[in-house]
Amino acid sequence: MNILAEMLLTEPAPMAIWATLMLLTLPALVVLANPDGVRDPVAALLEAVRFVRRTRRRRAERRTAEAAEAQAAVRFALELRVAAAQAADAVERWQAHWQAAADRVDAAWAAFQAADARLARSRATTAFGAPWTPRDPAEYAARERFLHEGVRAAVSRADLPVSALADVLAGGGGWDPCLHPAEQEIVLHRRCAEHRERAYRAAVAAERAAWHDTQLARRGRDSLQREAEIAESRVATWPIFITAAGDLPLTVGNGGHRLSPAHSGNG
């Protein structure tokens, strides 16, 4: 260490003198730096002061713009993260909806198989022909009661729609109460099997639609998650700290952490 440096470090007076001299010569340096300043030093000093003020104002405006841009980036990233979380919840709901639809398909198939088996048994029992019965009013009234009771029981089991009971009571819908009970049973079981088959096909179509919607929800969730990760990676490049206005203080940093609302208050 030379003598001058040692003196400046150990003795405060020379350092103060040097600083004072530099401050006193600064206006002269400013004036001499501008050729017009030699003719009008006061105007040159005022221009220098205005230049310093403009520089500070521009720097402050630039920092304010950067802060606003970073604030917008933070809010956008947080909104994407919230949207991705909501999309994930929606996927779970669609998944449950699809699972319920798949369960209904299994139930509808089992019901169709049972109805088809009853129809097969009815056909087998009539292979030997219907037994003879007297054709009098009492017999036809009994046949009509048999048909009504059979349709009512099928409707209660959901083997037939409710409209079938209304049709048979009104004497329409293609129901024939004059048929022999054995023949009525075949007609009844055939209609039950047809209804169960339609219900099964409708359940399959609903299950496919639910699966399609579930896949769409998954793709939407994955897309939002990717967008959120991209937005967060951009936010992580801002080397500043930002507090958002409102109830969600946000932080922006370059530490590579996942974006999340910052805690505020005493929580």
Image (cartoon, rainbow, N blue to C red):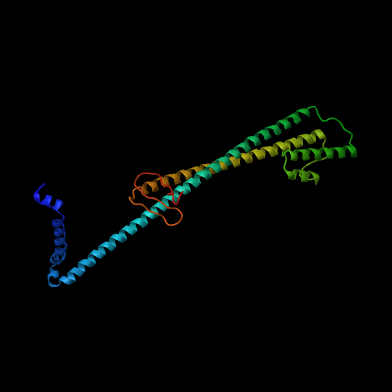
Residue beneath the point at 68% across and 35% down: 111
Residue drawn at the location 15% of the way across and 51% of the way down: 10
Q: Is residue 24 above or below residue 140?
A: below
Q: Is residue 184 above or below residue 234?
A: above
Coordinates of residue 182 in the picture (x, y in percent): 80, 33
User: In the figure, residue 210 lies in which quadrant?
Assistant: top right
Residue 259, position as x, y percentages in the image: 41, 47
Q: Is residue 219 left or right of residue 132?
A: left
- Residue at the spot x=18%, y=71% of the render? 43
Res 164 seen here: yes
Q: Is residue 256 above or below residue 190?
A: below
**Outermost residue toward the top?**
128
Q: Is residue 212 visible?
A: no
Q: From the viewer's perspective, is 229 left or right of 215?
A: left
Q: Residue furthest left?
A: 3
125, 115: nearer the viewer: 115
Which of 234/159 is in front? 234
Q: Give the side of residue 18 with respect to residue 137, left or right.
A: left
- Closer to us: 93 or 214: 93
Choose between 157 and 61: the one closer to the eye: 61
